[in-house]
Amino acid sequence: MTVDLDWNNLGFDYMKLPFRYISHFKDGKWDDGELTDDATLHISESSPSLHYGQQGFEGLKAYRTKDGHIQLFRPDQNAARLQKTAERLMMAPVPTEKFVDAVVQVAKANEDYVPPYGTGATLYIRPLLIGVGPVIGVQPAPEYIFTVFAMPVGPYFKGGFKPTNFVVSYDYDRAAPHGTGAAKVGGNYAASLIPGQNAHHTGYSDVIYLDPATHTTIEEVGSANFFGITKDGTFVTPKSPSILPSITKYSLLWLAEHRLGLKVAETTIKIDELDDIAEAGACGTAAVVAPIGAIDIKDKHHVFYSETEAGPITTKLYEELTGIQFGDVEAPEGWIVKVD
């Protein structure tokens, strides 16, 4: 590897790499797409993505294995989720084969920036779909751009796999009932900026968002999904139409049941009934598996397993998941796509 970076101390920051992929949808069809060294998008000032938020995105990673190869984790699931986002926002969907091919091209073209095995760092890949073209009324775009770029990153939460604390938001909601909460769109994240900033400034890793209708049940953990391990050994995670369906969460659900032999349930988790949960965590592509030490709920400081040590089941899930991603543990069929 010829790139001179401090792989063990990467943050979660943008870095301009040599290549990215771009494809245009026009006159009812996608072009073939190509790699480019141009990191600037050229779009109309009246593009619906700029004015009306007609855009969606994904996040996935490329991993360096012990023998030096590069692999992707379930990119077909990211493609399916972007297609659902596109349907919700009336955008042109990107076919799965095209999506996966674009991601593979970008990872391969930037292979010198895929961090070495053992550093814990990865190549974060960001596919983006935006509505473009001369539109000023509130209506779908006539054209679309699908682009994929990447950068090497370290842990999303500082400290890596160590418990951190979160705070419940009662003043702000992540998404509206029957809104776009289940779609991966920029507006959901824009809505989380103020509460997220407030949480960081007061020493928390992120915010626990409650259901927007009643503020009584847990929905998401800022930029990740929530999960818990009950005292009777059940893996539980919230179920709601306004939660983004996390690929990491559904992978953990499968692994908890089929590899660890746990009972699993997508269910309602009431914020005032957490005493039955022994371990808790946040999970997602960026967060991976992040133990939650405690949650502050108004005046109550609710501690789970420990504020300094990850719980045993959370640790096993983390090791199983990352073992698969880095090629050290056998993956379920279809979960891994080889880049080289």
Image (cartoon, helix red, strand yellow):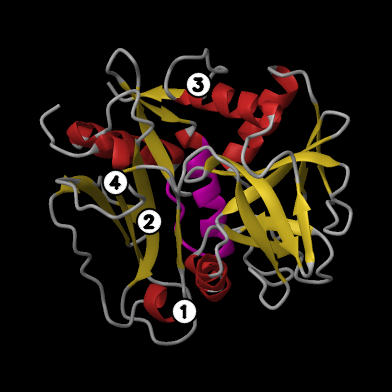
The residues tagged by marks 1 and 2 sit, at their Cα atoms, a distance apart of 16 Å
Helix, strand, or loop for circle 3?
helix
Give the residue type at disc 1. Answer: Tyr
The residue shown at (51%, 24%) is 335
The residues tagged by marks 3 and 4 sit, at their Cα atoms, a distance apart of 21 Å
For disc 4, the marked residue is 150
**Which circle marks residue 311 in the picture?**
none
Give the residue type at disc 3. Answer: Ile
The residues tagged by marks 3 and 1 sit, at their Cα atoms, a distance apart of 39 Å
Name the foreground residue: 252 vs 19.
252
The residues tagged by marks 4 and 2 sit, at their Cα atoms, a distance apart of 11 Å
x and y, in percent, of residue 208 in the image: 67, 60
The mark lying in front, picked from 4 and 2, is: 4
Judged from this view, the residue extending furthest toward the left is 2
x and y, in percent, of residue 90 in the image: 52, 65
Q: Which is nearer the N-term, disc 2 or disc 3?
A: 2
With respect to residue 56, does 44 lie above or below? below
Name the foreground residue: 120 vs 57.
120
For disc 1, the marked residue is 52
For disc 3, the marked residue is 324
Helix, strand, or loop for circle 4?
strand
The mark lying in front, picked from 2 and 3, is: 3
Number of residues whose C-alpha sits closer than 10 Å to that of mark 3, classed few (under 14), some (14–19) or many (20 or more): some
Where on the picture, by quarter, is residue 92?
bottom left
With respect to residue 118, does 195 lie above or below? below
Judged from this view, the residue extending furthest toward the bottom is 137
For disc 2, the marked residue is 128
Number of residues whose C-alpha sits closer than 10 Å to that of mark 2, classed few (under 14), some (14–19) or many (20 or more): some
Give the residue type at disc 4. Answer: Ala
The residue shown at (49%, 79%) is 139
Q: Which residues are magenta?
A: 77-94
